[in-house]
Image: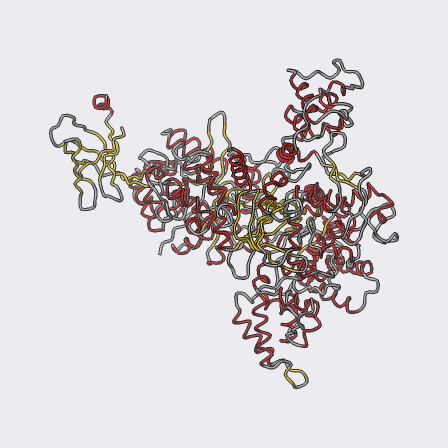
Amino acid sequence: MKVDEAVAVELSSTGSPVRFRWRGVVYGVISAPEIWVTRQDWWRLAGRAPRGAGQRLLEVKVWRVDALPLTDGARRIDGTFDLTKNPITGEWHVASVFDDERDQQLWA
Amino acid sequence: MPRFTHLHVASAFSAHYGTTPPERLVEAAAEQGADAAAITDRDGLYGAIRHVRACIAVGIDPIVGVDLGLTFDPQSGNSGRVTVLAHGNNGGAGWAALCRLISAAHGRPTKRNTSSPATITRERTRAFLAGTDGPVGTVLLGADSDVGRAVSAGQLKDAGTLLERWKGTLPGGIVVEVVCHFTEPGDSRSIRHAARMLELAEAHQVPAVLTNAARYLEADDAVTGDVLDAASQLSALGTFSPQPNAQAWLKPGDEMRALARTITDYSRLDRRSADELLSHTEQLADRCRLDPDTDLQWRKPKVPELSALGLSDATDDPNQVLWQRCEAGLTERYDNPGDALRLRLRDELSTITGFGFASYFLTVADVSGLMRDLRVRNSARGSGAGSLVNYLLRISNVDPIEHDLLFERFLGKARSTLPDIDIDVESGRRHEVYRAIFERYGSDRVTLLSMQNKYRARGAVRDAGLALGLDEEQIDTVAKNVWRFDAKEFREVLNKKPELREIAELVREDNKLDLLVDLTERLDRLPRHISMHPCGVILGNSDLLSMTPVQPSGIGLPMSQFDKDDIDDAGLLKLDVLGVRMQSAMAFALDEIIRIHGPRAAMAGNLPLDAPYVNPDGWIELDAIPHDDEPTFEAIRTTNTLGMFQIESPGQRELVGKMQPTEFEDLIADISLFRPGPMKGNMVAPFLDVKHGFARPQYLHKNFIWFLKPTYGVVIYHEQVLRIFADCMGIDLAQADELRRNMEKKVEIVEQLFRSRTAANMDEGKRRYTDVEIDTIWAALKGFGAFGFCKAHGAAFALPTYQSAWLKTHYPAEFLSGILTHDPGMYPKRLLLTEARRMGVPILPLDVNASSEVYHVEPVEGAESGLAGEGGLASPPLGIRLSFSDVHGLSHSELSRIVVGQPYDSITDFYLRAKPSRGVFQRLGQVGALDSLSQDDRTRGDVVARIRQLTARKTRPAEGEQLPLFIDDRDLIPTGNPEPSAREKVSNELDILAMELSEHVVESYRPMLDEIGVTKASDLLGLWNNTTVLVAGIRVATQTPPMRSGKRVVFISLDDGSGCSDSTFFEDAQQAAGPLLFGTKLMLIQGKTRRTGERGMSILAENAWDLKQLWAQWTQTRKEMLVP
């Protein structure tokens, strides 16, 4: 499920997410992140695309992690998260959440 | 250091896919430490020769393959793509197999098969790649192969079955290609996908190799890749599924090795597998290293066998045959061939045979003879005209002795690749010539040359605009204004050029357009698509198809995947058979002369009745006409050169007017001078001053007088530079040509050599040249050497120039009908009509009973005779009948129906038998083509009304229905409809025929032009220099020729019915005119007269206006004035 919401993330010494707080719940990462690379629609977001700016415009690095809720909250998810980091602002986002069982409840 | 070889790399020659030229990819690979580099373009070897050349240049081994589609299998639903690499060091077996595999994938060339996708079935790969001692190529089954797709779909069992089938098809020639682009886990090219591929290979005992399936050099180029994807999908970004990310770049070896480990870590295999993956990759790379010499016969000439020329491979010696043919030519071409001539022939032949080029010359002579047999006009162009051998073999029709042309300029002693011989033929019969060549030498030895069409500014704007989803109108606005500069400099020139002012404003306002500028720059020069070269034919030996892949060309003949830059290195013979419209126009004129005049041709053309070049039946041997015809030169000197080959442009008219040529040598000089170098170097002024007797010739040295005299002391030709070098330094002409070639790049070395050798050149103990003389001569050489022109080239060019001028002078109607039919020039046809009228040749209107698909000459009853002024020739009472070819919207089949059905008795008869579409019928009526089927008392309006009556019926009356043999419906034509006004007629004619007949388009603006005091073009010559004038007219030419200062100058020629005015726009005037400069057809220009010669007057423009806008304002103010 696409989410794309900003989150606060705590990183390990190697720059991998360890904990993050999303929708009032703190999650702990319980897997080695699987890193993959997705893309964005640069032609909608950028005003220019000069030579040299291509990779930054196009690519977004994604950390796919399994995580467990560590605190109480109204909606707690036990599932897989895609976390992305904006290459320019350094801000982290939850890009997607995979939790088939709870999907319907959450976004009904 | 461990190496990594990228085995799957698409260059920019994978059209609409790759983004990087092969040369840059090779350099990058070498910088990364690779000792071999592969190119695997989609569907062909388009970039392969460049790749090999680049590899040789940086000293690494080339690897060549192809990325090819698999034929869709309707049973299994399988398709996809595989990569095939040629094995090397096997005497070319791998290369040959690759070529033939690719040709097969493209299918047979038929007229219908123009661009079907290139695909191959698994089974067929065996036929090409199996080889006698094991496979000669390897198939890489990657992420997009049938196997790879099954794996990403999770159908591991199917994947295994497919892999086993491949193994069985080509044992020892199959590898699994592992690719990881870090896509979303589970997707194709994800780590998981790569790991499953690796496991599959292991399970089936097939070697696995690692590649990055690269399509760009750097990740930055992925943006360009997105735009290319949009262009190939013909849809905007965001409306299709784009590439997953920007990982498909040429990653350095370290990163690729790390990638191997990452993939194995994700697999069930142990870490040793990573090393194995990398070592298998290098083993395959080693197997595929090509040796350019043994695998490609790099740069070695491959010409047709003697047997293909009708000689015997076994008993004939090409050198001997060439000697004999030249000997025969000597007695044919010259009355008394003397010793000097024989010596020259011996010299040329010894160079030619020394290089082993005898078969090449025999081949070209054979082709040239083939064209003569077809009676296709042809003439060699280029430096080849400098060869006596070419003249004797009748490849060229320019006598090198008469014009002092040098063989050494054509073929030096150092040259080892085949020289170029270009032959001009009638453009209308070019394809016929091609087919004849294929027929004669067989399609295993002949193929057409291709060319890569690259993105230029306009196309780049269009495709980038499409990718961004801009609307048509917006794209159009920008595209119409971007030309005359490199797309790469778009942003730079945007704020500099006055005509782009409005575009720059739009870009500032609109984000998308700002982005468009960047994307346009990115696309610049990328190959777009391949097409047939307009003139190149490749001739080879019977192994040609093992050297180059071929694909359908669109005209039913195969075309090589190589372009002109590949030919030398591939060792192939390229024959440039250039279609020249002027040759067609002249051939047409000659046919008209014999058709109209027959045995009276000489008299009709005011020629001596016993002229040896006119056959009794009226056929004129144009290549045999004398080159000193005074009426022809007089006609040229009037500068009314419209239609004359190469001397009709405004710039040339100015030069011809200044030069006032009196002999053939002057024409050669004129053509050689009218180029950037000499114009910038101001070689024109001293030439003219001496010619007209204003100055004494300045010969560089008395030793040079004999060869500088024809050009009045000015060094114009390469041939003269060669003679100077040779005489000063005491070297031969071939060595002199080597020096000349190095003048630009290694000028210091040449100077040093020149000074030392010339100083050491002694004559009976005395120095031939003093130090002061050496300084002077060197200064001149340095100044002129690089600008010089090959005289042989100029002489070959001057021949059709002179021939066309001769025809125009002696047979104006016949010549102009040829020009109108084949349209060889730079001007619109409407201007040619003006010229015909000026020469007293009446233009006969379109008539369904008299017109045809071409412009015919027709005797005119009661026409005025006499052509004043131009050489005093009486013009025959001949007119030119307009042709159907210019009727807007008239289809080919309609045209042939009309012509076949002629003559017609009535409008109804025409309607029933010619079956024109409603629109065409009406348009024909509007331009008066049916007037002759009407009554004298009926108007054009009546005819059009009758057409409306007929077409108003829902169904066309069937043939036979109520059809008497002769339908006379003249009485049925209604009456009382008004004759259209002159303005209406002109407007109809312009819309329908793109030219006006009743009166000149400018005439309807006459009241305004008269009121504001506009000068007619024909009256300009009578004005004083530096008079302020206004001229008006319709634009007929726009040029931005090279200028001495290097600044841009724009020439605009306007036609106002009385003739042509040429205006020059310098910087200020360009600013003032702004977007009008290139955008407006009907213009008013204000400026000052500037005398350019005895017969020349041009205008130094100050400002310009749009005539239509002015008219609107003018009529508005007049209305206001009328209203109280």
Residue B664 placement, left or right of A82: right
Question: Where the N terminus of chain B falls, by quadrant?
Answer: bottom left
Residue ID at (65%, 31%):
B981
Point out the residue furthest to the left here.
A72
Residue B793 visible in the current orientation:
no
- Between residue B661 and residue B942, name the one nearer to us: B942
State the image quarter where residue B702 is shown. bottom right
Which quadrant of the view contains residue B585?
A: top right
Measuring from the top left, give residue B276's x and y in whole percent: 36, 46
In the picture as drawn, the residue positioned furthest to the top comes out as B962
Residue nearer the viewer, A32 or B86:
A32
In the picture shown, does residue B38 fall above or below B1108? Answer: below
Q: Is residue B892 above or below residue B818?
A: above
Badge count: 0
The image shows residue A45, relative to residue B792, as above or below, that is: above
Q: Position of residue B461 (x, y in %)?
A: 46, 42
Depicted B700 relative to depicted B1041: above or below: below
Residue B214, x across and y down, in percent: 41, 44
**Image x and y of residue B658, in percent:** 66, 60
Quick one: which residue is furthest to the bottom in this view? Answer: B765
Left or right: where does residue B1114 sit relative to residue B974?
A: left
B926 left or right of A49 in image: right
Q: How did the renderer colour the structure?
A: secondary structure
B790 or B181: nearer the viewer: B790
